[in-house]
Amino acid sequence: MQFSELGLSNDILLALTEKGYTEPSPIQAKAIPAVLSGQDIMAAAQTGTGKTAGFTLPILQKLLETNTTNKVKPNNTRVLILTPTRELAAQIYDNIKVYSKYLNLSSDVIFGGVKINPQMQRLRQGVDILVATPGRLLDLHSQNAIKFNQLEMLVLDEADRMLDMGFIHDIKKIIKVLPTTRQNLLFSATFSPEIRLLAKQLVNDPVEISVAAENTTASTIEHWLIAVDKNKKGSLLHHLITSEQWPQVLVFCRTKHGANKLTKVLESQGHKAAAIHGNKSQNARTKALAGFKDKSIQVLIATDIAARGIDISQLPYVVNFDLPNVQEDYVHRIGRTGRAGVEGQAVSLVSADEYQQLVDIEHVIQQHITRRDVEGFMPQNILPESRDIKPIKNKKPKKIKGLNDDKAKRSEHKNGQRSKSNKKGHTNQDKQGKAFSSTTSKKPNKSNTNTNSNNTNNSSDPYHKTR
């Protein structure tokens, strides 16, 4: 199939041709016709499969067809795309600008971490497509800088990550102020029970699209692990970068502090490195990402906030310096390489204390990760052999705060009514109970507690040196 067979305008096709795109990916081939039909969509696809184009291309086509009769008004938008992170919002916006190069359509992106006034000024003209993170969108709406009177479509991208990051309350607030008549598109890496519960509140009779089994790794990615002592990880990473002559590598750390620490170590070893995480200012994050894209920065160290927001064409290597705490994030981390059909490699540096995380990851992806040894870095603390992989069982939805708020409030109201009806009958008993309690209760004796401190040995690896 060619893009020319999907009902897209010549101007959109020209922009795609200039980017070298001729054949749609499986998710694009299924999603584009479905979105153009006007139906609500629930689409699941692993990272790196081109799902952003799967919804942006048909959105541009639909807006183009009605652009002459439905001009956007000041402080309004016709399409709202919600994303969990600033990096992902900027990435989607960049793609929209490329695809709409020859179209008379406007687009903008808003997120926190930067001044709000310039965003308010840009929105005064109105915008056809607005890409936003939930928090900043609510701030702008509360100041009447953005209205939704003309909204035609709502896109919720990376819905599973939205839930993981606790955005459910913001999403519910946003949905309440949107027109009820609109087309809804929900894109997620998985169709987990939690996502289906969210979808019931968002989409109407949706078309379900799925192009790969849940949490599968892309066939274009060669991924393996190296068992290594925790205090040797920094030295091993330096060895891999230099001995293998890696031109560019994205490294994932579990914590912000760890990312900063590793950046300083790599810089002291002569590598051009930068860190990107939630404590960095937006300007610092943008600068680091831009430097990594133009290859002036060789090593980018990131936390999981960037796992789904970094799109580097032909990124060759990804390293898990620490295994993620959330098993599913493994797929999204290594999915930063091997994108758009280009092959990539991902290596995890695994210490013995991460064994349970390794077991959980292998269970989620339903495969054992190949192990390789590196001479000079054989661990003293042996990483146990992987366990047999059992099939994944269907799970009940996790109790995510916010998804069932309405039901909880109804239950609370009923219990309150019961309490009122029983209050009079229990008044005397309560008084008697309080009197009894006041005469019999005694204050507990204070006791001294001793705290133990663990002593740690200084390591030869500068990444793990302690004060």
Image (tube, rainbow, N blue to C red):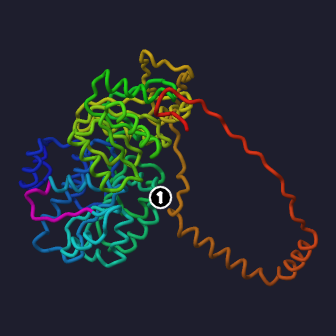
| Residue 345 percent across, percent down from the top left | 32, 29
Instruction: Choose top left, top right, bottom left or bottom right for residue 337.
Output: top left
Given residues 181 and 361, the one toward you in this image is: 361
Can residue 220 be seen here? The reply is no
**The quadrant where residue 34 appears:** bottom left
Q: Quadrant of the N terminus?
A: top left
x, y percentage for residue 177? 37, 75
Please name the residue that numbered disc 1 is placed on: 166
| Magenta residue check for 453 | no
Give the residue drawn at x 67%, y 74%.
Answer: 415
- Residue appearing at x 37%, y 71% in the figure: 139
**Percent of width and height locating residue 216:** 38, 36
| Horizontal side of residue 269 vs 426, given as left or right | left
Regarding mark 1 in the picture, which secondary structure is present there? Answer: loop
Whether residue 227 sits left or right of residue 138 in the image: it is right
Question: In x, y percent, where is residue 439?
Answer: 93, 73
Can residue 127 be seen here?
Answer: yes
Q: Nearer the viewer, residue 187 or 318?
A: 318
The residue lying furthest to the bottom in this view is 424
- Magenta segment: 99-109
Is 108 covered by the magenta stretch?
yes
